[in-house]
Amino acid sequence: MLRTWRTFSMLLFFVLLCLAVGQMGVFFTTTEAFNWYNTLNKPSWTPPSLAFPLVWTTIYIVMAVAVWLVWRAKQPHYRRAIVFWVIQLILNGLWTPLFFGHQGLLGSVILIDVLWLVLAITTFLFFKQSRVAGILMLIYLAWISFAGLLNFMIWQMN
């Protein structure tokens, strides 16, 4: 019973941690930031603004379940995989303040490129720990690939 509670509490911790990082971005997506974003030239394939919070909420839950699976599996070197996961989460959390808060188009392109690289390493390490965790991280990596391309195109067009 105690082990089940600890396992569940860790899953809850990871989910809340990820959602908290995502929620921190709300402080930088002010009305002024949205007005600025709406004035930018964007590719025709840019998703509607409503899609972003829905996708990101899903992605945060997916990445939380993935790290929980790695934590639970405790295969050799699982701590290294979790350290990379923490680094990518920090980089992820920095993107919104840079893009929306500082209107740093080039800086956010560079940041998302670094995030993509750390995330790719994290995904590789997660596959060594848990196949399901690796697959979940591939979903996140696919989204970051799309978001990175979108970010690059917005920078180029503006």
Image (tube, rainbow, N blue to C red):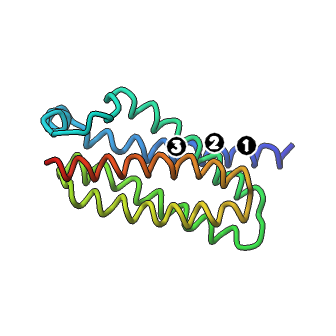
Residue 109 in the image: state x and y as whole percent.
29, 58
Question: Which residue is label 1 attached to?
Answer: 8
| Picture layout, residue 89 above or below residue 27 | below
Q: Which mark is residue 12?
A: 2
Q: Real-space Cα distance between discs 2 and 3?
A: 12 Å
Of discs 3 and 1, which sits in the foreground?
3
Q: Are marks 2 and 3 in contact (CB under 8 Å)?
A: no
Number of numbered discs visible in the structure rendering: 3
Q: Real-space Cα distance between discs 1 and 2?
A: 6 Å
Which residue sits at x=47%, y=56%? 89
Q: Secondary structure at mark 3?
A: helix
Amino acid type shown at disc 2: Leu
Relative to 50, is 74 on the left or the right?
A: right
Which residue sits at x=32%, y=38%? 26
Residue, far right: 1
Question: Which residue is label 3 attached to?
Answer: 60
Residue 87 in the image: state x and y as whole percent.
48, 64
Few, some or many residues within 10 Å of mark 1 (<14, 14–19, 20+): few
Of discs 2 and 3, which sits in the foreground?
3
